[in-house]
Image (cartoon, grey):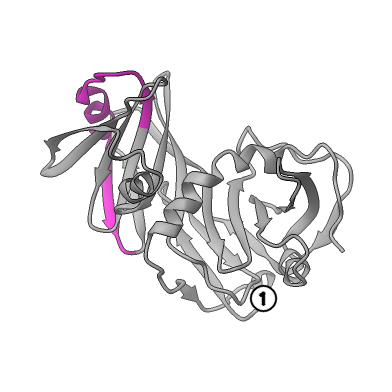
Amino acid sequence: MLVHATGLTVAKWRRQHFDNFLTSNWATPCQPPLVASVADDHYQSKGQVMSVLSPDGRSIAIAGSSREFTGTWGFKCTLRRQANLVALNVAAAGSYETVRRHNGTLEKSVRREVSFRDVALMSYETEEESVYTTFLWRSAHHELYWTVAGRDVSFSVFTEMMAAVDLNDSASGLLVTPRRGTGTSVTMVLAANTLTNLCAVAITPTTSPSIRVPAHSGKQVKGGVMWRTDTRRQDGSLERTATIAGATAVTDLGFFDPDAPANVELAENFQVAIG
């Protein structure tokens, strides 16, 4: 059985970021997993290891499930330049507009467009009480977007940020590389996807300052130490998350059906390593 933990904050913190990533995955076409040969006994599980390229150039190795991921991966990264720190979102090309169109907010936004390095940059300004602007860079496979509060925000704020990095887009991922001499760094803080008909998956590096793992002992599983947290939604339904703390990553598994028998098997076998 999963070990229940009270006062668990790590899963609660990352659930704030689930909606955007999960809806984006709903909107993107399914892609076959990138399967590599199993070379390390530590990741022996179902005979497969999935390798994912994060925007900051690190490899995320995932094993322990025979199910495919529903869509492409979504990432949240930080771009630090001097004293400035901003949050960037990376998703499959077309995700932002498709999701906003689905929830009815795209038509209510004011759209602008400029050209930057022969690529179109767009901005979407909301007309709601809480005004914010989202800047969007899109290529063939992936897109990068950043949201800031305010109206009539100049494109120069975004182009100056983009001028500090090189963006290399391919089917395997979007690589965001800081340009030399700009004093810029890029760090992944969250990777998210869904396992088909089973659960939402959120992966956070153990180096993240937002990680809060319970001090008491959890259950030892293949992926590290595992805890479980149960919460009640406003409608009274049960929400169940298993959190697995490994050497390099903390993973949240947000189960769609809290009582599905497959939950326990997944939690005991799921393994993640960030290289």
Q: Which residues are magenta?
A: 147-171
**Picture coordinates of residue 261, whole percent (x, y):** 77, 72
**Does the stretch in magenta take in 223?**
no
The quadrant of the rendering that contains the N terminus is bottom right
* Residue at numbered disc 1: 44
Amino acid beneath label 1: Gln
**Picture coordinates of residue 18, whole percent (x, y):** 55, 46
Q: Residue at the far front: name it.
A: 235
Q: Assess disc 1: are there few (<14), some (14-19) or many (≥20) residues with their C-alpha within 10 Å of its C-alpha.
A: some
Q: Judge by depth and name the residue closer to the eye, 160 or 40.
A: 160
Q: Is residue 157 left or right of residue 65?
A: left
Q: Residue at x 40, y 20 (%)?
A: 129
Q: Quadrant of the rendered structure where residue 155 is?
A: top left
Q: Quadrant of the rendered structure where residue 270 is?
A: bottom right
State whether residue 4 is above or below residue 85: below
Q: Is residue 200 left or right of residue 226?
A: left
**Picture coordinates of residue 104, whole percent (x, y):** 37, 42
